[in-house]
Image: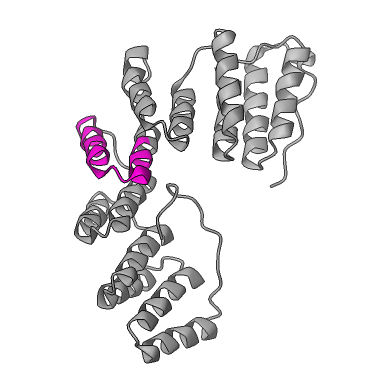
Amino acid sequence: MALPRPPALFKQWPEQANVDNDTRIYIQHACKARAMDKAEGVLLQMVDNGVRPNTVTYSSLIHGYSTSGQLEEVARLLEEMKTQGIMWDVFTCNSFMDYLCKTGRIKEAAELFYSMAEKGHKPDVVSYGIMLHGYATEGSLVDMNDFREQMVRDGVVPSLSVYNILIGAYAKCGKMDAAMLVFEDMLKHGVNPDQVTYLIVIAAFCRMGRMDDAMDKFSEMIDMGVPHDTCVYECMIKGYFRQGDLVKANELFTEMKNKDIRRRPQKGSGGTYYV
């Protein structure tokens, strides 16, 4: 990813609003490009020119480090914010919850979640998604379901990422009836399954030897025009191999080659999906 031109000297920007906007744009681009050294460079440039970093600046950096797995840096920046008396916003809280979940501190993450409203920060769909993914990763389906029910009570509309997290959690445990209920619920609410959704479901059915169900979803995926690559074909082929159906496996392999199906990068819609 090409980075935008770094912000000009901060002393040339008389208005704080311009500093906030330009800095946020650059830091977000740098974080997305995993160029955290460049993002930190902008932070140092701000300090050197007498511009005090604010919540927006720190939150962008924290999110970048959390996404790239550099959790020690997340802890460092959070401590800096605390030391400098910089207030958190929802984005900061979400990034911290993500950090806590990734370090196995799900209980602390839940405490932070419940304290958000008390501090004037209403949890959003991202907040719920982080907690749901944290419990799903631990296999704590009861707690995951509790959060899902609270999400409904609070009127927060699930996103595609949230649906994929829920379906993935059930599929990982072999609870395909529950997974398919969530699948139907997302359709009911007008959320269209993506490549990740179908891959989760198809892979789970294949692992369980339910090849008829896997083929139904595979065909549905194609009929719906959802992009499919070698991953879904490989799941189907391996599933038929396990059942000793070499004819079906070979048919799919030939189809994949004839269509020149290739692996495509997985665009995240919710984290790890237990394929």
Taking the image as shown, residue 11 lies to the left or right of residue 106, namely right
Q: Is residue 181 left or right of residue 59?
A: left
Let me know if residue 58 appears in the view: no
- Is 152 included in the stretch rendered in magenta? yes
User: What's the magenta bit mostly, secondary-structure-wise?
Assistant: helix
Q: Is residue 98 above or below residue 44?
A: below
In this view, the residue in front, 72 or 200, is: 72
Residue at 35%, 87% in the rendered image: 244
Residue 141 inside the magenta-drawn segment: yes
95, above or below 209, in the image = above
Give me the residue at 46% from left, 66% from top.
227
Left of 265 or right of it: where is 38? right
Q: Position of residue 188 (x, y in %)?
A: 22, 53
Whole-percent x, y for residue 218 in the image = 35, 73
Write down the quadrant of residue 221 in the picture: bottom left
Q: Which residues are magenta?
A: 131-154
